[in-house]
């Protein structure tokens, strides 16, 4: 059974804090993604990684950075959290090649920045 | 940027009724996917439609891809409370996906 695990279901942080969101997948997938989900806006891509140490900006990268030191782990970093980063954050992974566009998601991290 | 607009944004109906939700774009997609996201969980893939005009059935759910591959619809027959969730369409762009705005469906017992 495929699994994408996000380290926290809920997080509460203060403005200006550095925040780490962790994601681990056990499917040996090459691609990993971070999205934020807001009502009425669907899922918006923050960053995408297609290999270890490789990353590509998504549609809304401002205020975020990422790290992928190992194939199975993809971290999202908020260098200085702001209230407008309060949201649901979803991590996903997919393989390359055949079936490449099927994404498998974690359960999400609901982040509140006060 | 390829955009996917879904309608309606919210839908609340009685158990046993039929419903259709829509996913529209001005761009052509090579395929479209439908995901369902239940409360407290991440989205899960339901189906991928690939050919223009294609119809796929998944029990009481019928998915159709438009002839011009710019739109798709999801029809649910005799809705059940277990169908409650957020329905998202998504279209591929290289290794990534563009997601629609979502339809939040609530089935009232």
Image (cartoon, coloured by chain):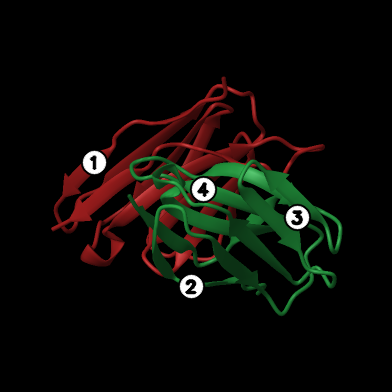
Query: Which chain is drawn using red?
Result: A
Q: Image point 62% across, 49% down: which residue?
A: B61
Q: Image point 67% across, 34% down: which residue?
A: A30
- Check the image and report above or below for B47 versus A93: below
SS category of the residue bearing label 3: loop
Q: x, y percentage for residue B96?
A: 66, 53
Pointer 4 local density, CA inside 10 Å: few below 14, some 14–19, many at least 20? many
For the C terminus of chain A, which image quadrant?
bottom left
Q: Which chain letter goes with mark 4?
A: B
Q: Which chain letter goes with mark 2?
A: B
Q: x, y percentage for residue B57?
A: 71, 46
The answer to whether one can see residue B68 in this image is: yes
Residue A10 is labelled as 1
Of tags 2 and 3, the one toward the viewer is 2
SS category of the residue bearing label 2: loop
Residue B34 is labelled as none
What residue would you read off at disc 3? B94
Report how many numbered discs are placed on residues in the image.
4
Labels 4 and 1 positioned on one and the same chain: no
Tell me whether the residue at label 3 lies in contact with that at label 4, contact meaning CB atoms closer than 8 angstroms. Answer: no
SS category of the residue bearing label 4: strand
What residue would you read off at disc 2? B8
């Amino acid at each position: 059974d495929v699994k994408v695990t996000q380290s926290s279901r809920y997080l509460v942080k203060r403005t200006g804090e550095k925040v780490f969101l962790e994601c681990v997948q056990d499917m040996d997938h090459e691609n990993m993604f971070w999205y934020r989900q807001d009502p009425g806006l669907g899922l918006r891509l923050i960053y995408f990684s297609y290999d270890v140490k490789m990353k590509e900006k998504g549609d809304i990268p401002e205020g975020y950075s990422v790290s992928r030191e190992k194939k199975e782990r993809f971290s999202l970093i908020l260098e200085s959290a702001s209230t407008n980063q309060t949201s649901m954050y979803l991590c996903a992974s997919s393989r390359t090649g055949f079936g490449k566009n099927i994404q498998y998601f974690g359960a999400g991290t609901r982040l509140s920045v006060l | 940027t390829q955009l996917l607009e879904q309608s309606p944004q919210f839908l609340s109906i009685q158990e046993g009724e039929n419903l259709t939700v829509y996913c529209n774009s001005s761009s052509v997609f090579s395929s479209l996917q439908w995901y369902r996201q239940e409360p407290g969980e991440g989205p899960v893939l339901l189906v991928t439609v690939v050919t223009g005009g294609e119809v796929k059935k998944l029990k009481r759910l019928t998915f159709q891809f438009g002839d011009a591959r710019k739109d798709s619809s999801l029809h649910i027959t005799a809705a059940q409370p277990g169908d409650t969730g957020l329905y998202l369409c998504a279209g591929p762009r290289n290794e990534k996906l563009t997601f629609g705005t979502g339809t939040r469906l609530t089935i009232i017992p």
